[in-house]
Image (tube, rainbow, N blue to C red):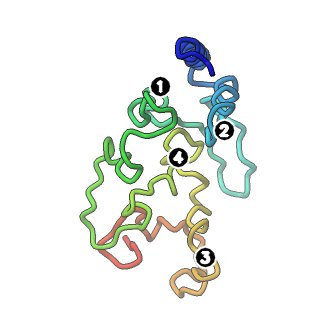
Amino acid sequence: MIPTKLWTVSACIVVAAVLAIGCKGTARYETLSFFFDGVPTPQPTAGPEEQPPTTGAPSRQVRYREHGPYAAKMCNACHDPTSFNTIVVPIDQLCFRCHDIQLDKKYIHGPLASGGCTACHDPHSSQYRYFLVSEADSFCTYCHNPQALERVAAHQGTSEQCTACHDAHMSDKKYLLK
C-alpha cells in the first residue's frame, strides 16, 4: 500500500503537469484523456478556416469560436476545481447561472425546458453560429424526423431553414412558430 505522503506527492506532480500543459492544444487533450473519459476532442485554432465549397450561394467564411468562460480559461465557472470533470451545479441549472433566459412563453422547446442546452449547443467551442453542435440548415433533423416533417403541408416546397418560421427556444404559438 502506498503511504499517504507518497500518494499526495504523486497527485501533486500529476496536477502540476496537467496545469503546466495549459488549456489548449493536443498535449492537453492527450494528458486529460489519459486520466478521464469524455474529454472534448481539440478543435482547430481560432481564425479563418478553408472556405466551404460553393453551391451557387455566396460562400461565407467559417470561424471557430470559443464560449467566453472557456476562452478565458475560467473552467471553475462551470467545473468544480476540487473534483475533476464534475460541474458546480446540476446540468439542468448550469447555463442559467450566466444566461438569463425567461421561460415565460406558452410553449418551450423540450431541451430548454429540461435544461438540456448541450443537446443543441456546445458549452466549450464551435465553428457554428450560436455554438450549435452542427450546421443550422440540417440541425433540427438530428432529433426531428425529416420524413415526418415533409408530410406537414407547410413544409412542402420550402427550402427555408427551420428557424425562418420556428423559434428554437420558445413561443406563445404552437409548434414554436414565430
Q: Amino acid at mark 1?
A: Lys
Q: Which quadrant would the N terminus be assigned to in this image?
A: top right
Residue 147 pos. (x, y %):
64, 81
Residue 122 pos. (x, y %):
53, 46
Pick the residue in front: 120 or 91: 91
Badge 3 vs badge 4, beta-carbon distance below 8 Å: no
Residue 155 pos. (x, y %):
55, 80
Residue 114 pos. (x, y %):
39, 62
Dot 3, how many residues are within 10 Å of its Cα: few (below 14), some (14-19), or many (20+)?
few
Badge 1 vs badge 3, beta-carbon distance below 8 Å: no
Q: Amino acid at mark 3?
A: Asn
Q: Which residue is mark 2?
A: 41
Name the secondary structure under disc 4: loop
Q: Compare marks 3 and 2 and give the one earlier in the sequence.
A: 2
Question: Looking at the rendering, which quadrant does residue 103 occupy?
Answer: bottom left
Dot 2, how many residues are within 10 Å of its Cα: few (below 14), some (14-19), or many (20+)?
few
Q: CA distance from mark 3 to mark 2?
A: 28 Å
Disc assigned to residue 145: 3
Position of 68 with respect to 53 (left or right) is left
Q: Which quadrant would the C terminus be assigned to in this image?
A: bottom left
Q: Which residue is mark 1?
A: 73
Q: Which residue is mark 4?
A: 122
Q: CA distance from mark 1 to mark 2?
A: 16 Å
